[in-house]
């Protein structure tokens, strides 16, 4: 019996095999998938996106925001087509490559690990470990996760991801990047819901399930 503490709904590990190649491993809590898989995938993706700002050095902050915006546009425009391979250019981060998501081959010493837990205050994304060297590793890992999730998602899942990222960027236009990630996360989910409801659209199953 757990008296204190929380059990993650789902966790993720993003391993960088080199600065331009990321791999993703998803770990749901026992018994949650497939019933809650759509919701958990969306929560993990937006959760890590919202966790990255406070851990991204100021010199990479504008690069992260610009790259996130381009990534969201690319995902939303893909509809049900295969994603382009250049959704995230690493040139703003000092490399000429585009970020590539490759099959999982195991963890790496600098892997980024995060999870999402359900609390009385709502869903909370948590960073469980991170790259020790200064630089944009968490920001790049977050975008790698989004690419991996979008590649496996249907049209509705991609739209929910893209609108959630749009909401995240809207939050950080008005709020300090060191504000609590759970606040940005909740705002991102509510923004995605509001955008779809204003258009008279039905909420995608994963987004409809999440309660920030």
Image (cartoon, rainbow, N blue to C red):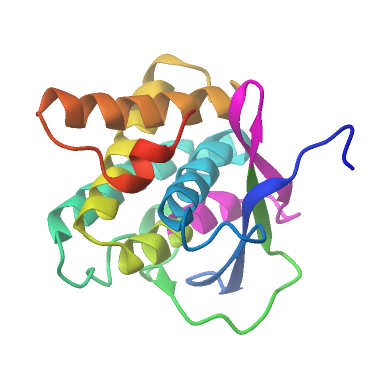
Q: Range of the magenta residues?
A: 117-143
Instruction: Tell me, yes or no, whether the highlighted magenta stretch contains residue 59.
Output: no
Question: Is 132 left, or right, of 178 in this rendering?
Answer: right
Q: Nearer the viewer, residue 129 or 45?
A: 45
Residue at figure coordinates x 44%, y 55% from the top left: 143
Residue 123 position, x and y percent, is: 58, 32
Q: Nearer the viewer, residue 174 or 154?
A: 154
Question: Is 39 left, or right, of 56 in this rendering?
Answer: left
Q: Nearer the viewer, residue 175 or 7?
A: 7
Residue 90 shows in the view: no
Question: Is 155 left, or right, of 45 in this rendering?
Answer: left
Question: Is 165 left, or right, of 84 in this rendering?
Answer: right
Looking at the image, residue 105 lies above or below residue 149: below
Residue 142 position, x and y percent, is: 50, 52
Residue at figure coordinates x 67%, y 61% from the top left: 30
Residue 111, quarter of picture = bottom right
Looking at the image, residue 56 lies above or below residue 169: below
Instruction: Tell me, yes or no, whether the highlighted magenta stretch contains residue 123.
Output: yes
Residue at figure coordinates x 87%, y 40% from the top left: 2
Quadrant location, the N terminus: top right
Residue 68 position, x and y percent, is: 35, 45
């Amino acid at each position: 019996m757990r008296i204190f503490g929380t059990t993650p709904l789902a966790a993720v590990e993003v391993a960088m095999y080199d600065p331009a190649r990321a791999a993703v491993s998803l770990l749901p809590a026992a018994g949650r998938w497939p019933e809650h898989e759509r919701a958990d995938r969306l929560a993990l993706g937006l959760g890590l996106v919202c966790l990255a700002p406070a851990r991204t050095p100021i010199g990479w902050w504008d690069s992260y925001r610009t790259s996130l915006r381009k990534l969201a546009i690319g995902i939303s425009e893909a509809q049900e087509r295969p994603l382009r391979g250049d959704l995230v250019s690493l040139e703003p981060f000092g490399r000429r490559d585009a970020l590539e998501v490759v099959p999982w081959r195991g963890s790496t010493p600098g892997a980024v690990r995060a999870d999402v837990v359900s609390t009385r205050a709502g869903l909370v994304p948590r960073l469980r470990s991170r790259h020790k060297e200064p630089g944009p590793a968490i920001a790049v890992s977050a975008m790698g996760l989004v690419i991996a999730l979008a590649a496996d998602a249907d049209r509705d899942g991609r739209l929910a991801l893209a609108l959630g990222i749009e909401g995240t960027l809207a939050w950080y236009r008005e709020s300090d990047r060191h504000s609590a990630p759970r606040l940005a996360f909740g705002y991102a989910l509510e923004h995605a819901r509001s955008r779809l409801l204003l258009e008279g659209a039905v909420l995608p199953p994963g987004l409809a399930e999440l309660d920030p």
